[in-house]
Image (cartoon, coloured by chain):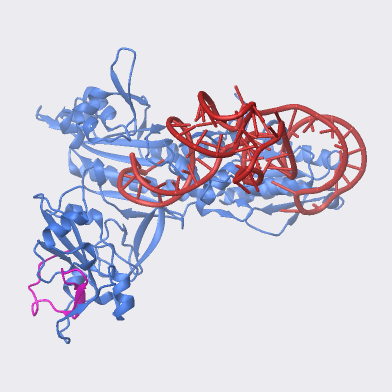
Chain colours: A blue, B red
RNA sequence: CGGAGUGUAGCUCAGCCUGGUAGAGCACCGCCUUCGGGAGGCGGGGGCCGGAGGUUCGAAUCCUCUCACUCCGACCA
């Protein structure tokens, strides 16, 4: 068994710092932006090799392996079967699914010595579907759920935040095969539950949210987000129900049902210095909620389409691109195109006499007496009212939800939080099985295309997300289940004191025997250095052995989360710790 | 790929403007001293100053090109 093997239950669960170098850094590496990246570098968990490529050092690997272990246990418990597929994948399978052409430069492609085309796997739908069509012949073999924990490569445009958005990363991906939708629903639900168990066991505060199905395609989809301020995604929650959705998807309702009656006259105003909503609001003292901005995008027919949202709202590009009138992917019109079609620049657009088709957001449809551009440079209309001044065009949900919006399920209002996406489950349907002709024979001997689900967890990202959520000014505060060690054993002046030496060695042996993962700091350094390192790397429990306490037959025990020591008699330490560790 | 910026010791950075042959702190090695919150002293190892070309008697420093990396935008576990 190699030294440093991090799998609990093996003989090498313990370690001495003299044999387990802690490459801690006092100073913060200049280019690390977020706490997890900084702390992983400072704690000596990872080292960057090139952009988006990291070596996991022994300390970091112990954490990664613990997360993997939890994932594996819960996948197994949920009835999934582990396998392992190659990282290198032949182009022909990707051509069969159509993704060789669809997938952008994120797919790293290359040739082998025979000039055959390959790619590094960013995901494994093609490979698993190919496997399934060869291995699965009968409906009797269904349903089945295969998973692997393996390295993925995605040639990200901009890798950042350390392991949170690396190009090479560890992912758990699972793929299930079914005869019918009911069976898929069942496995999907089982995976949903398994994911909740996994993230709960990892000690993370998380939420499962309804999500967009994105490029992978399919019907139902949920994302699992670890809640943290540095998260890249925005998630909307209801205050009064369990509604939760990615802001990309969350339905935006108007904040009232009725449009008020007009109370102002329509008025053409000179606004030479107002090219943006902010300037208009500032210069004319209009509430921003009473303004409308007009965004022009490419239409599905190649013409232009205007999308109108309230001045204080943001266009949701995912929603916009899904409209039948709008080209997908979404493309904003250039200033030249707008001038050619409207005769005014982008700062002076509005619904009145707009010569191109328009779609208005629900919140715009219930406005009265609002202000918008006049489609003449330097002029705005104030006091615009639908139906009185112009007909109400088509209404759609076009915007991002904001804090305080009514919840789409009618219960409560929305709050917005930041999240880190650590898991994503999809119902794929027959997208891949149909393209690649993956069928089984049903009970009538007829070939039926299998229905698929897929389920991913960013295992290496979970490590980063855990730190984002659990750190303080001294360093990492690991949730017990994924800490690299459970206990740090720190002798004070070990060289000088035979009593300390003796006591610490005895404790070390006892802890090993009790199955506690302990790191003995036998470097004979000054106490401050040991304390600082121990806090930086975030070990949940610290046991300090010094002359001071030994005089009374006691040692100091302190959890990483507390500032106070507990004095525990020498012969009770192991029992005390075992009790505490079993509680979590 | 567009925009901004940075490349000097393992890490954090100074030196560059105004060319004269390489520095500090931390880390590392040795000795001494110290020892309950990242001590102090003395000594030491470590850098083709990202690379190539040019200007010059002389280039980390000035010029050109190149490469790498970081940050800001669209993707995703």
Q: Quick check: A441 above or below A27? A: above
**Magenta residues, start to end:** A368-396
Residue nearer the viewer, A380 or A392: A380
> Where does residue A216 sit, x and y in percent of width and height?
25, 41
Is residue A100 a member of the stretch shown in magenta? no
Towards the viewer: B49 or A195: B49
Residue A306 position (above or below residue A88): below
The answer to whether residue A39 is visible is yes
Residue drawn where x is 73% and y is 57% of the image: A565
Q: Position of residue A121 (x, y in %)?
A: 34, 30
Q: Does the stretch in magenta take in A378?
A: yes
Q: Does residue A226 appear to the left or right of A32 in the view shown? A: left
Query: Residue A362 placed where, x, y %?
Result: 18, 68
Corner quadrant of residue A373: bottom left
Q: Quadrant of residue A128?
A: top left
Residue A450 in the image: x percent, y percent?
18, 34
Q: Is residue A252 above or below residue A231?
A: below
Residue at (62% x, 49% y) in the render = A540
The image shows a total of numbered marks equal to 0
As rendered, which of A213 and A65 lies closer to the eye? A213
User: Which residue of the protein is positioned furthest toward the top in this rendering?
Assistant: A114
Q: Which residue is found at the position 48% from the left and 52% from the top? A: A204
Residue A513 shows in this picture: no
Farthest residue in the bottom direction?
A263
């Amino acid at each position: 068994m190699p030294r440093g093997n991090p799998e609990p239950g093996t003989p090498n669960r313990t370690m001495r710092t003299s044999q387990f170098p802690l490459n801690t850094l006092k100073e913060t590496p200049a280019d690390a932006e977020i706490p997890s990246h900084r702390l992983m570098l400072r704690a000596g968990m990872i080292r960057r090799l090139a952009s988006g490529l990291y070596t996991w050092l022994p300390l970091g690997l112990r954490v990664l392996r613990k997360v993997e272990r939890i994932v594996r246990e819960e996948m197994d418990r949920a009835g999934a079967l582990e396998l392992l597929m190659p990282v290198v994948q032949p182009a022909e399978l990707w051509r069969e699914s159509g993704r060789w052409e669809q997938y952008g430069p994120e797919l790293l492609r290359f040739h082998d010595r025979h000039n055959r085309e390959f790619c590094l796997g960013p995901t494994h739908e093609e490979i698993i579907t190919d496997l399934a069509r060869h291995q699965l012949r009968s409906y009797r073999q269904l349903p089945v759920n295969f998973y692997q924990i393996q390295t993925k490569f995605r040639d990200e445009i901009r890798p950042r935040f350390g392991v949170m958005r690396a190009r090479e990363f560890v992912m758990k991906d699972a793929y299930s095969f079914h005869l019918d939708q009911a069976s898929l629903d069942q496995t999907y639900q089982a995976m949903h539950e398994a994911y909740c168990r996994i993230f709960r066991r990892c000690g993370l505060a998380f939420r499962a949210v309804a999500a967009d199905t994105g490029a992978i395609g399919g019907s139902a989809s949920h994302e699992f987000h670890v809640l943290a301020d540095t998260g890249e995604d925005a998630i909307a929650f209801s205050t009064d129900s369990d509604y939760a959705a990615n802001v990309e998807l969350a339905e935006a309702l108007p904040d009232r049902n009725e449009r008020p009656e007009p109370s102002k006259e329509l008025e053409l105003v000179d606004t030479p210095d107002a090219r943006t909503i902010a300037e208009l609001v500032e210069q004319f003292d209009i509430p921003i909620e009473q303004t409308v901005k007009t965004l022009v995008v490419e239409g599905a027919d190649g013409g232009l389409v205007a999308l109108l949202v309230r001045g204080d709202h943001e266009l949701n590009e995912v929603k916009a691109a899904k409209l039948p009138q709008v080209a997908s992917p979404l493309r904003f019109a250039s200033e030249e195109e707008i001038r050619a079609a409207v005769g005014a620049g982008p700062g002076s657009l509005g619904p009145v006499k707009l010569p191109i088709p328009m779609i208005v957001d629900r919140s715009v449809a219930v406005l009265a007496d609002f202000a918008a551009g006049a489609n003449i440079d330097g002029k705005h209309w104030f006091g615009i009212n639908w139906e009185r001044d112009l007909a109400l065009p088509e209404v759609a949900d076009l915007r991002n939800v904001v804090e305080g919006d009514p919840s789409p399920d009618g219960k409560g209002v929305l709050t917005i939080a930041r999240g880190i996406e650590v898991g994503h489950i999809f119902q794929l349907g027959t997208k891949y099985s149909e393209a690649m002709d993956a069928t089984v024979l049903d009970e009538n001997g007829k070939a039926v295309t299998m229905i698929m689900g897929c389920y991913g967890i960013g295992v290496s990202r979970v490590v980063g997300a855990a730190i984002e959520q659990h750190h303080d000014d001294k360093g990492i505060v690991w949730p017990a289940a994924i800490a690299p060690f459970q206990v740090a054993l720190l002798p004070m002046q070990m060289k000088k004191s035979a009593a300390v030496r003796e006591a610490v060695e005895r404790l070390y042996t006892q802890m090993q025997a009790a199955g506690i993962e302990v790191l003995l700091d036998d470097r004979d350094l000054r106490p401050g250095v040991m304390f600082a390192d121990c806090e930086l790397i975030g070990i949940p429990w610290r046991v300090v052995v010094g002359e001071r306490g030994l005089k009374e037959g006691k040692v100091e025990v302190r959890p990483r989360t507390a500032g106070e020591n507990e004095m525990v008699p020498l012969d009770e330490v192991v029992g005390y710790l075992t009790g505490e560790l079993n509680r979590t």
